[in-house]
Amino acid sequence: MDVTPEVEPAAAAVVFGDRIDLARAYTADLVARGEELGLIGPLELPRLWSRHIINCGLVAPLLYPGVVGDIGSGAGLPGIVLAIARPDVDFVLIEPMERRISWLNEQKQNLGLANVTVVRDRAQEYPKGRLDQLTARAVSAFSKLIPMATPLVRSGGELVLMKGASAAAEIAAAEKAIRKYKLSDVEVVELGADVGVDITRVIRARVP
């Protein structure tokens, strides 16, 4: 079983621009300690850049200056990655597990990410209506994320949720929740084709 860490793809420099050194430092720390800390599995190392770091970084252009929440931030995917890519945006990383909170705070300090606030909390208990946008990755199905995430976002804000190939099917399965929470402009955005990497899919929706 090959667990050799992936060599940085050329697309990384395109995605992160002059912030690439921070992305490299974060990725190197994940390689060094991520498995030991239970943040990533050993099988993720050979695809860490392409499947995780670049995958998250591609979402950065969908964000606008304001406060963006990342629920279930875990290893910082996507929260830390997006904070690296978008220093003009403030990020609130919401995570209930103490050991992951320690990791996130350490990354914030080591990388000098003044635009990051780490909060130990469950999404359901975080104050309502304070976020301009909210993201999440590998947390839950869209139908379950809607009641968890929508109340945290201010009126007129957005959900920007990272999803896999089943994104369109998840929207169809969430029809009742979409109506109940009056979400509008619900769409799947596909990212990454222009930089020659695997497609990243995002479900984007407007909060009433």
Image (tube, rainbow, N blue to C red):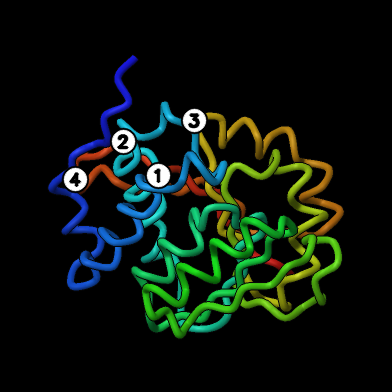
Specify which label sits upstream in the sequence, 4 or 3. Answer: 4
Q: Alpha carbon of mark 2 to alpha carbon of mark 1: how far?
A: 11 Å
Q: Nearer the viewer, residue 15 or 98?
A: 98
- Report if the CB atoms under discs 1 and 4 are less than 8 Å apart: no
| Kind of residue at disc 2 | Asp
Specify which label sits upstream in the sequence, 1 or 4. Answer: 4
Q: Alpha carbon of mark 1 to alpha carbon of mark 3: how far?
A: 15 Å
Residue drawn at the location 62% of the way across and 69% of the way down: 69
Q: Nearer the viewer, residue 8 or 85?
A: 8
SS at badge 2: loop
* Quadrant containing the N terminus in the rendered view: top left
141 relative to 114, above or below: above
| Marking on residue 198 | 2
In the image, farthest residue toward the left: 10
| Marking on residue 165 | 3
| Kind of residue at disc 1 | His
28 relative to 197, above or below: below
In the image, farthest residue toward the top: 1
SS at badge 3: loop
Residue drawn at the location 43% of the way across and 71% of the way down: 83
Residue 31 percent coordinates (x, y): 35, 45
Judge depth for marks 1 and 3 and give the one in front.
1
Residue picked out by circle 1: 52
| Kind of residue at disc 3 | Ala
| Kind of residue at disc 4 | Glu
| Marking on residue 71 | none
Residue drawn at the location 18% of the way across and 40% of the way down: 7
| Marking on residue 8 | 4
